[in-house]
Amino acid sequence: MTTEPSLANLVVKKNEPPVGNYLWEDPPDEDKFSACVHCGLCLEACPTYQELGHEHQSPRGRIHSIVAVAEGKIDINEAFEDPMFTCLDCRACETACPAGVQVGALIEEARGQVRQARPLKGWQGLVSRFFLRGVFPHTKRLHTLGMLTKIYQKSGAQTVVRKSGAKKVLPDHLGAMEAIMPDVGRPVLKTHPERIPAEGEQKGSVSMFTGCIMDVMYSDVNEATVRVLTKNGHSVEMPKQQQCCGALHVHAGDREMGKKLARENIDTFLEADADHVVVNAAGCGCALREYPELLQNDDEYREKAERFAEKVLDVSKYLYDYGYRAPEAELRKRVTYHDACHLAHGQGVWDEPRDLLEDIPGVEMVPLPNADRCCGSAGIYNITHPDMAGRLLDRKIEEVPDDVEMISMGNPGCMLQMAMGVMNHGRDEAIVHTMQLLDWAYQLEGGETDD
Amino acid sequence: MTEKAEMVEEMIRQLGDDAVLHRKEDLLTYECDGLTVYRGMPLAVVFPSSTEEVSGVVKWLHEHEIPFIPRGAGTGLSGGATPFGGEVIISLVRMKRLLDVDYDNREAVVQPGYINLTLTNSITHKGFYYAPDPSSQACCTIGGNVAENAGGAHCLKYGVTTNHVLGLEVVLHNGEIVEIGGVPDAPGYDLMGLVTGSEGTLGIVTSITVRILKNPEAEETAMAYFDSVEDASYAVSGIIAAGIVPAAIEMMDEIAIQGVERATNPVGHPEGSKAVLIMEVDGIATGIEEQIEEMVSVCERHNVVDIKVAKNDRERGRWWANRKTAFGAMGAISPAYLVQDGVIPRSRLSEVLAHIADISAESGLRIANVFHAGDGNLHPLILFDARNEGETDLALDVGSRTLEACTAVGGSITGEHGVGIEKKEDMRLVFSDEEIERQITVRSVFNPHNLLNLDKQFPKPARCGEVKQAVGSGEAHQVAEQR
Ligand SMILES: Cc1cc2nc3c(=O)[nH]c(=O)nc-3n(C[C@H](O)[C@H](O)[C@H](O)COP(=O)(O)OP(=O)(O)OC[C@H]3O[C@@H](n4cnc5c(N)ncnc54)[C@H](O)[C@@H]3O)c2cc1C
Ligand code: SF4
Ligand code: SF4
């Protein structure tokens, strides 16, 4: 083999201006991708790279591909789609990146282009349109779905399904999900009044974003959150017109619907005019805080989006920053804490929930190794990419220390995923939200025993 | 079947479907390493999981005369893992196990894809660590470290990678597996010294035995700000002259400071500081206080503006994160950068820096300086925008001129990043044609057909294009076993 490599031929003379193969609105932003200097410091932070070792499945590789499309070197095809959608959107790379590259936003923009160029077909298209367009944008329909689930659970049908092995006809991972479905309560958006006054001296007032999965699947967490807030002197307002945050849409590349929901939420909450909008679902909180990004090309809403996003805080950070009192009763539990990606990497909230938990008398915190590595839930990722999601979940559960009784976290998607992991591994740790632990501790003060 | 299709089929047969990448889209990101100005497309990337798999792949490629390149994390800064076009990349990242730790003998055995920092993280609970700490340590592989003889902030006191490698398992150009080193001071040639730093041109490292060290009993870190780089450089010389052996002395200049403050790990360096020094001493607890006090007083003699000592490990950690992410932080102030890696006698620091400032002014490109000041290893970061016509070439030229500035005072063209593609031609600044030829003769003992990381590291000698490949592969093996 004789090659006569010439140095001059290898020098990249000039990158073509990005027009390339992005043909639709909101293409990946040149300012964002040109910040990447290809240093590779994000590689080991990326769960999909850790699993596969393939660089096109790493943050650096994904950005490289995004740039290549912009420069017209490759097309938007299946080979481009795969790494864009195998990304968990977990943002671990953003924590690791010294240059502050907004990898998540770039990938979401790329997904928007992919979905325009290659709409989902067949049953995948049907299912995705049904949920993304038909259910999530309509709070009522979502609640109806919740009701149906509840009827399914209460009517004995669930028992029948579980016993009869009917769930064997479901794909493996869906069967497993069915098995861990929490008992569905009634959404707080329906059960609670628009305004819940603070207990005792008023220290603050907040609007609460209830989240759709959270409110349908884990309304008990929302109830606990309301109690913890009011107990600490913060009145809670729940604007009834609020909508799904649109995170699932943006992740799936449906930016159109994502933007529509964003505008509605911005209007609703700006009208309510509270100083803060608190959220207990990390995925929603992160999405709400990124509305300005989503609406950057919308002249009418850009500024409103910024005003709104500044108000949004995760509930743990809100309590920590704006006043809370440590519970007095003892809750003797060994607890470990899992960082939801969209809380830690997405919103920079690491210490606050841990500090809140540590302040509960009797709680013994046990560190979880690699607590901030994604559990594989990632919105609906565990449904679209069961294999990768399963691998990450196994690693996560294997690292949970043997002797803890509870795993605490701040996101409903993680709670479902971790519950499934604990079950699959034949373990019995309780999966709880940080607000639930606080709530129980406060309740114990009243002499109730609720654990 | 085309040559490529046949190769891909064979690789899949040997390694499995998910261990071979061959579509253009999947290969693109492998067209360069951490140095993006040179790019070439590989034919394929393969991911062996064991020494035997590496050997099988190499044997086949050797028989079919297809050139190949070992690659770790691809964080290299000289294009060592960058293809010229048409090579097969052998990625070692799936070989990432810690094979053995022997605390009594203070040794660890790792696979080549094992990440540098992961080693320290895995042994820290026993009070041990792995000393070489390149700033890329959170991601780069120990195999890549061996190939580049990587250094780091703490190599001032503890030495570079070669001082910590005890034994290697290497797959030779024809697929043969040999072990070298393992016993201290073995008779015969120091082949480990030869292979370490050979940038993947002599063999593929498939297992590494490294020395691990006991954590120091105590450490103290100080940060000092100066109004001029001259003052800071005199302070560095003063500290070394005072007989202190610091674990590290790092310097960043004004532009570098702006970069890190705008990036992900700001620590609040005062606005307008012209230079900052980060200094660390470690060792047995007694004496540490005195050493740091002495360093403070040397800095004071050289007009230090402000100096502070890290209050705790957390603060120390933040300071180091700030320094160690400095290259990447350039992304916050420039769309691209080119980092150079010159070495100079420490006493000439301020003179060379002034020269570099002139080059910057003449060319119109900003240059940030980040460096291991204690051992005179400069990293001028040339900031440019590849989208501007001709600016990449200009940056490359500026890079070469900064190296000339180093060699002019008796320095060298690389301290730790290697030669790779980037500095091939610059080798002429330090070696005569004859010397280059001699080194290529050594290479051909191990790499007779120039298939292993084809044409890296050395320029073609101007006088004679061909180097006689007198030594056959069989003999290469003998040499390897001789030690
Ligand atoms: C932000 C940043 C900071 C850096 N800081 C430092 C620093 O402080 N000090 C320093 O020394 N370097 C530094 N580097 C450079 C780089 O990280 C080192 O050279 C590192 O050793 C490369 O390791 P890698 O795994 O990325 O190897 P790669 O880049 O993949 O490969 C480097 C070379 O090694 C060869 N190679 C890789 N694996 C093997 C193997 N198993 N057997 C044989 N050859 C092999 C390749 O062919 C190539 O020639 C930095 C890089 C970046 C991006
Ligand atoms: S968001 Fe997560 S999965 Fe996606 S590139 Fe970043 S680290 Fe990897
Ligand atoms: S995303 Fe950030 S960390 Fe990753 S390669 Fe680009 S600049 Fe480096």
Image (cartoon, coloured by chain):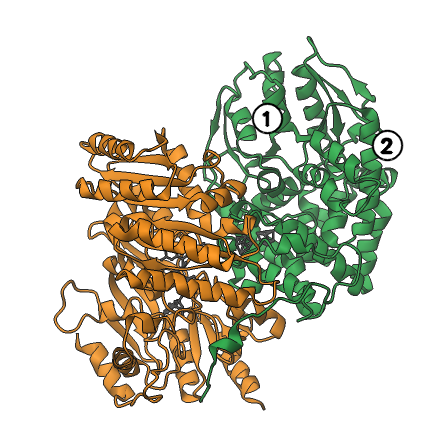
Chain colours: A green, B orange
Amino acid under label 1? Leu
For residue B57, side relative to residue B171 (left or right): right
The picture quadrant for ligand 1 comes to: bottom left
Q: Is mark 2 within 8 Å of ligand 2?
A: no
The percent position of residue B26, horizontal first and vertical second, equals 59, 69
For residue B477, side relative to residue A413 (left or right): left
* Nearer-N-terminus badge (1/2): 2
Is residue A119 at all visible to an observer of this figure? Answer: no
Mark drawn on residue A137:
none
Give the residue drawn at x 50%, y 19%.
A361
Name the foreground residue: B181 vs B40: B40
Quadrant in the picture for residue A277: top right
Is residue B252 at all visible to an observer of this figure? Answer: yes
Q: Residue furthest top?
A: A201
Count neighbours of disc 1 (C-alpha within 10 A) and say few if under 14, some if 14 to 19, many if 20 or more. Answer: many
For residue A418, side relative to residue B59 (left or right): right
Give the residue drawn at x 51%, y 83%.
B10
Give the residue drawn at x 44%, y 82%.
B67
Mark drawn on residue A241:
2
Count neighbours of disc 2 (C-alpha within 10 A) and say few if under 14, some if 14 to 19, many if 20 or more. Answer: few
The percent position of residue B13, horizontal first and vertical second, equals 51, 80
Q: Give the residue number, with chain letter if any, for mark 1.
A: A437
Q: Which residue lies furthest to the left in this view?
A: B187
Amino acid under label 2? Gln
| Distance from Cα at disc 1 to Cα at disc 2 | 29 Å
The percent position of residue A314, horizontal first and vertical second, equals 65, 31
Q: At numbered mark 2, what does the secondary structure look like: helix, strand or loop?
A: loop
Q: At numbered mark 1, what does the secondary structure look like: helix, strand or loop?
A: helix
Quadrant placement of the C terminus of chain B: bottom left
Quadrant placement of the N terminus of chain B: bottom right
